[in-house]
Image (cartoon, helix red, strand yellow):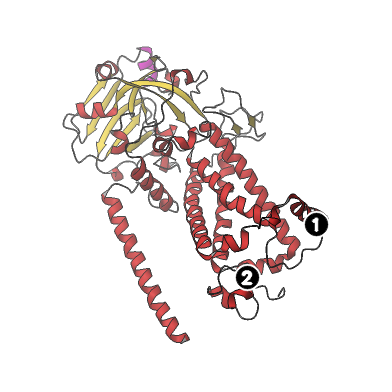
Amino acid sequence: MADSAYASGLVGSTSSPAGRVAGAAVRHTATVRVTHWITTLCFLALVVSGIELVISHPRFYWGEEGNVNTPALFSIPIPASRSSVRTGYDYVMPDQNGWSRYLHFQTAWIAVATGLWYIIAGLLSGHFRRNLLPSAADLSPRALAAILVGQLRSKPIGNDRTYNPLQRITYLFVIFAAFPLIIWTGLAMSPAVTSAFPFLVNVLGGHQSARTLHFFDTLFLSFFVLVHILMVCRAGFRNRMRGMITGGSAEGS
Amino acid sequence: MNEKLSRRKLIITGLAATAGLSGLAVAGRLAARHGLIPPDCRGPYGAGETLTYAAHRLLTRHSLAREFPRSMISKAPFANGKPPEMEAFKRLQAGGFADWRLVIDGMVAHSGSFSIRDLRELPVRSQITQVTCEEGWSYIAEWIGTPLSQVLAAAGMLPQAKFVVYYSIEAAEWWDSIDMADALHPQTLLAYGFNGGDLPVGFGGPLRIRVPRQLGYKSVKYITRLTVTDNLKTFGKGLGSASPEGGYSWYAGM
């Protein structure tokens, strides 16, 4: 019976420690909260170190090879940390690649382990099925358009205890498409990994294609994070933060 | 009821922590015995570096770097950096590198040296592989040379050897090392040829080591010396190569 009380909430299982918070229902389980914040820290470290690595060669290519002697697909108009890259600036940035590479890969290990923890726990507890899988009816273009129009008209966001279908689709896409793609394209840049698993890079069209796709996926994920923060602010920053930190949402219930 | 539960929880947590810690200790021992710990395994990034190196050694010990058809050889390869400015190099270059010597010492039965001509007498292997720089750029080229394993065999490498340390003519700045998985790998070459001709000075001529399963910085140019060893602690600061001393990882397969 206890289950029905939470059926529309975001909690995966009432037997979790978070489920016993006194009084109010719990917005997020402990697993979701802990993995959320570890992932947040990892994302920050990966983006910062990734930007440093791009600065050493702010040119992107398509296909297998690309260097300063070949035309770029596009380049980012910033000074580089290598004098060999002609950027139009006479300023050469300091080289930060050593620690950036170390930090990038160490963080990637933590992020992948955290992601696996979240996904396995989410599958076992029914978190994805219950909280993120949209129903077929929700997926009609009209229903989705209605949500979008409501958002754009700044309709006040209620204290919904469920995600709307647009949120569900976005979260599922980020978890099961954008994150796997960033790991895949990262591994596809490794000369050692691709020696054992050449298809990882071959199906992407080559080493430079993998690097360019890694960059675009980073842009997508960064855009997602920005919108995510914006929505949290619109929905009530303090309340939503409390939900993701302690699990509780006393005021809202 | 509550107290019982918490006691049981405490015991289980304690047992799990003990099991976890001893598991880690055993894993560390096993990893060390099987050569899965890189020389730069300490410091804030040591854990990640060790995981990467160990995972790669378990999954890629014998795999071959991707090779490409001749039609994909780059029309615009990039010779990164400048040739050595030192007098000794310029003198050797003026003499057509006829006096270039590759010294081999350390854990070998016969220490000695090879000229480029001596190396050409050894079995030849060529490969069309991609040079991938840690900065992100790359080019495809044909590399011609003798497998490092042939030179090690010719010098009578001792069975307890674990690493090959190699030095550029600018030895203070450019020296590096690889484990036996890479040293004995069929694609690891002492390259003297490039795209059908002699190896140009810009690309590391007269002699460059080519380690195609790692990033470009492991393929040190202007090689003059190989030292075979079972312990990297006695070289430089003990981190395996000049790269970690400059903040870069020793293993560069990623």
Which quadrant would residue B14 be assigned to in this image? bottom left
Indicate the chain on which mark 1 is placed: A
The location of residue A132, given as percent across then percent down, is 62, 59
Position of the N terminus of chain A by quadrant:
bottom right
Residue A56 against residue A116 in the figure, above or below:
above
Magenta residues?
B86-96
Q: Residue at x 26, y 29 (%)?
A: B149
Q: Residue at x 25, y 39 (%)?
A: B229
Q: Nearer the viewer, residue B157 or B28?
A: B28
Which quadrant would residue A220 be assigned to in this image? top right
* Residue under numbered circle 2: A7
Q: How many other residues sit within 10 Å of disc 1, few (<14), some (14-19) or many (≥20)?
A: few
Q: Is residue B187 magenta?
A: no
Indicate the chain on which mark 2 is placed: A
Q: Are marks 1 and 2 in contact (CB under 8 Å)?
A: no
Side of B164 relative to A141 (left or right): left
Residue B214 against residue A156 in the figure, above or below:
above
Q: Residue at x 38, y 69 (%)?
A: B17
* Residue under numbered circle 1: A150
Q: Residue at x 66, y 66 (%)?
A: A241
Side of A84 relative to B90 (left or right): right
Residue A185 against residue B71 in the figure, above or below:
below
- Secondary structure that dominates the magenta span: helix
Which quadrant would residue A181 be assigned to in this image? top right
- Of pointers 1 and 2, the one earlier in the residue sequence: 2
Q: Residue furthest front?
A: A137
